[in-house]
Image (cartoon, grey):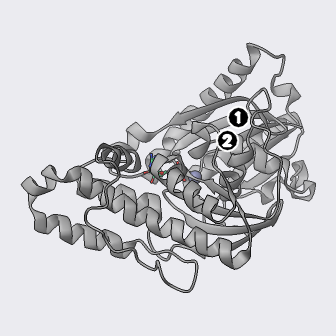
Amino acid sequence: MIILSIDTSCDETSVAVTKGRQVLSHVEYSQVATHAQWGGVVPSLAKRAHEERIDWVIEKTFQRIRTNTQISINNIEAVAVTTGPGLAIALEVGIRKAKEIASQQHIPVIPVNHMAGHIYSCFVQNKSENPMRPFSFPYLALLVSGGHTELVFMKDHHQFEVIGRTRDDAVGESLDKAARMLGFGYPGGPVIERMAEKCGNRDQYRFPRPMIGSDNLDFSYAGLKTSFLYFTKEMGEQERLQNIETLASSYQEAAFGVLVRKVEKAMKETQVSNILVGGGVAVNRRLRKLLRHTVKQQKGTVLFPPYRYLNFDNAAMISVAAVFQDSKSYVTDADMDNVDRQPRLTLG
Ligand code: KG4
Ligand code: ZN
């Protein structure tokens, strides 16, 4: 099936055209520059930027296909769109556009959960159908982004059970906040990663790892953030600047240490050995290395999104999640009014 997909859940206006798991074309228009000066995503600015850009992004996506195939909007068989979770007024822009196109073309809309998209991002293929990656259920999925930190048990296609989640901040958000305390802008994750690499990922300060030994699979990042705040304040500016790399690195080690330990615990408890990782933080090289090591020790396998853009918010993953969704979820013309934003949508 040839699908046009749209994701406007946060600060990327993203559109893709896919055939099965293959991405024929994808365009992401990032609003990072718009939000950077505010230290985070501002919903009203996000909405406006989506509205201003969405037609252009769709046009660009088709332009890119035209260079090697004859596919146009008339070949599209369904429009997949993220209905949640995300920023309500941002989601709305993509949903409205999806309905408009679907009505014009007399094709169904497929509503997709953004977090399911992050899980399926591990199975997205390029035009040459690489990587192959056959499905091998069950999976444990670790979702790590600016808004989510979740462990999900996935029995089969679209059968999700959230078995662990953060009780306060998400891990990406936590990295963003630590970066801000060190004087860096949004997003903080990439800066922390670079700083940490510069000092060989040293864990000099051994910051607390909240809930690492708890008897559940939940996470908590608020305590780590607070202890970092006091520690860096006490240091004073001069000393903080001198030790900025080891501070960033120690923070990252604490944040990731908990993720890795909980994955290990989940593997032991569920006896599931195939791990999927998705979300913006999954791009981090240190996290990938730590997870590969631990999963290997547990005799398991771990998959990350195969191409860089797939770690971040993108529409290609929304298409691929849609492909494996039951056709009962397709919404046709008569019921289009039922497709609505679900800002707090959860998995399972
Ligand atoms: O999935 P995503 O693009 O957006 C959502 O939150 O849905 O994730 C954004 C998060 C931000 O918190 C950002 O700091 C983090 O991903 N991030 C990283 C890296 N690049 C982005 N975290 C760690 N290392 C990175 N290289
Ligand atoms: Zn996301």
Is 55 positioned to the left or the right of 211 in the image?
right
Where 27 falls versus 89 (above or below)? above
Image location of residue 163, percent across then percent down: 66, 76
Horizontal arrangement in the rendering, residue 110 relative to residue 298 (left or right): right
**Residue 348 circle label:** none
Left or right: 34 in relation to 84: left
At a point 88% along the width and 48% down the height, the residue shown is: 333
Q: Mark yes or no: residue 144 visible.
A: no
- Give the residue type at disc 1: Ala
Give the residue number, with chain letter if any, for mark 2: 315
Q: Position of residue 181 (x, y in %)?
A: 24, 58
Q: Residue at x 65, y 66 (%)?
A: 298
Residue sticking out furthest to the bottom: 215
Residue 266 horizontal side relative to residue 324, left or right: left
Quarter location, residue 154: bottom right
Helix, strand or loop for disc 2: loop
Percent x, y of residue 36: 35, 44
Q: Quadrant of residue 182?
A: bottom left
Q: Dot 2, how many residues are within 10 Å of its Cα: few (below 14), some (14-19), or many (20+)?
A: many
Mark positioned earlier in the residue sequence (2 or 1): 1
Label 2–label 1 contact, CB within 8 A:
yes
Q: Residue at x 60, y 27 (%)?
A: 56
Identify residue type, mark 2: Ala
Q: Which mark, by number, is residue 16? A: 1
Quadrant of the rendering where the C terminus is positioned: bottom right
Residue 35 in view in this figure: yes
In terms of secondary structure, where does tag 1 sit? Answer: strand
Quarter occupied by the N terminus: top right
Disc 2/disc 1 C-alpha distance (Å): 5 Å
